Amino acid sequence: MASPQPPYPASARSADDDVLRHFSARERIAARGGRVTRTRLAVLEMLQHGSHPLSHDEIGDALASAGVAHDRVTLYRALDWLVEQGLARRIAGGERAWRFEGVRDAAHRHAHFHCDRCGQVVCLEGLEPAPATALPNGFQVERAELVLHGQCATCGHGDEEARPR
Amino acid sequence: MASPQPPYPASARSADDDVLRHFSARERIAARGGRVTRTRLAVLEMLQHGSHPLSHDEIGDALASAGVAHDRVTLYRALDWLVEQGLARRIAGGERAWRFEGVRDAAHRHAHFHCDRCGQVVCLEGLEPAPATALPNGFQVERAELVLHGQCATCGHGDEEARPR
DNA sequence: GGTCTTGTTGCAACATTGTAGCATTAGGCG
DNA sequence: CGCCTAATGCTACAATGTTGCAACAAGACC
């Protein structure tokens, strides 16, 4: 169920870049009093680097192909911890599975686009979900999730090999 | 995992009301060339009547306590069929499970509020998710889903017995 | 560097939510 | 009433998480 294209393209980053990010991820984990373990480190780097939200499954595949040994449960727990610490965000991707994205600026939120054909999710940085609204009495809004559904550029392009769901 | 309060309060409807709705549901099913079976009928009535989206689980419980025998798989298929026919809508409720709501006006869409404490979902009739936005080139939006997260009136009321998730 | 403490991992088992295949039942038409 | 076939109701299975617990290792302390 993983996406065909690798969501963590190693070719796209330089060594410096990687070292910086590595340090940063390590520090961010340690700063929260958590132990720096290989799974947390690799996952956080991946999320910080990634351009779009990744599913647990995609992250697992990426870890595997990066040679990072890991357990399914450990990955779930690492992700939970990152979310808990505010280093990652969990979004409901339309399918049953959660998707995760790295958090750079805790204040900044954005909407997402879910392609109903290939299942891919992309961030819409420019679009902030509007939380201000008239709610029934006694309701307190903490955050808003806006997901647009439709067809992504790749799937609309006549690339009909994408899985039609 | 079903909600504590019955989502289909029989006490709240009159006999006339029920007869009318019953007829309506029966007709709406038949009008689409489907066979009127007890599960479809009961589910559609329940959704038409319900004030907020129900999970498969809640619907199953409600059917059971209404004395309508049904199978888990049949219920899934009945719901799928209703969605396919435009009689119901499927929304991603925040948890992994889908929720379903009856469709009165196909053109009308609204946002939802998900209580992160008790898991309940309510409709925000007044709030229409804004689909118009600047998307990357080639993207086609078909619909928008807006879900506000927070605490509902009941849970904010000091009713701390609600499951804290 | 060695040792200790305890936060994390890795495994196995289980829970929830949904699908697929297929024989049997029953809706509704003539 | 009888027939045709759409729906049902099994039983399996798949996908996505979660729980419990013994073993391990990160990092602090000496």
Image (cartoon, coloured by chain):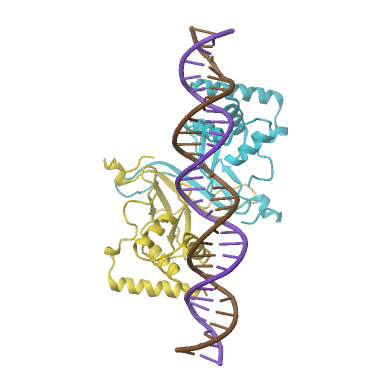
Chain colours: A yellow, B cyan, C brown, D purple
- Is A86 located above or below residue B86 in the figure? below
User: Relative to A23, is C16 on the left or the right?
Assistant: right
> Could one spot residue A134 in this view of the protein?
no
- Is A42 located above or below residue B131 in the figure? below
Total residue callouts: 0
> Which image quarter is the C terminus of chain B in?
bottom right
User: Relative to B120, is B14 on the left or the right?
Assistant: right
Image quadrant where residue B37 sits? top right
> Could one spot residue A40 in this view of the protein?
yes
- Is B92 located above or below residue A101 in the figure? above
- Is B121 located above or below residue B46 in the figure? below
The structure residue drawn at horizontal position 70% and vertical position 54%, both measured from the top left corner, is B157
Q: Using the image as rendered, state which of residue B144 and residue B83 is in the foreground.
A: B83
x and y, in percent, of residue C29 in the image: 50, 11
User: Relative to B5, is B125 on the left or the right?
Assistant: left
x and y, in percent, of residue A3 in the image: 35, 51
Q: Using the image as rendered, state which of residue D17 and residue B97 is in the foreground.
A: D17
x and y, in percent, of residue A92 in the image: 48, 51
x and y, in percent, of residue A134 in the image: 57, 48
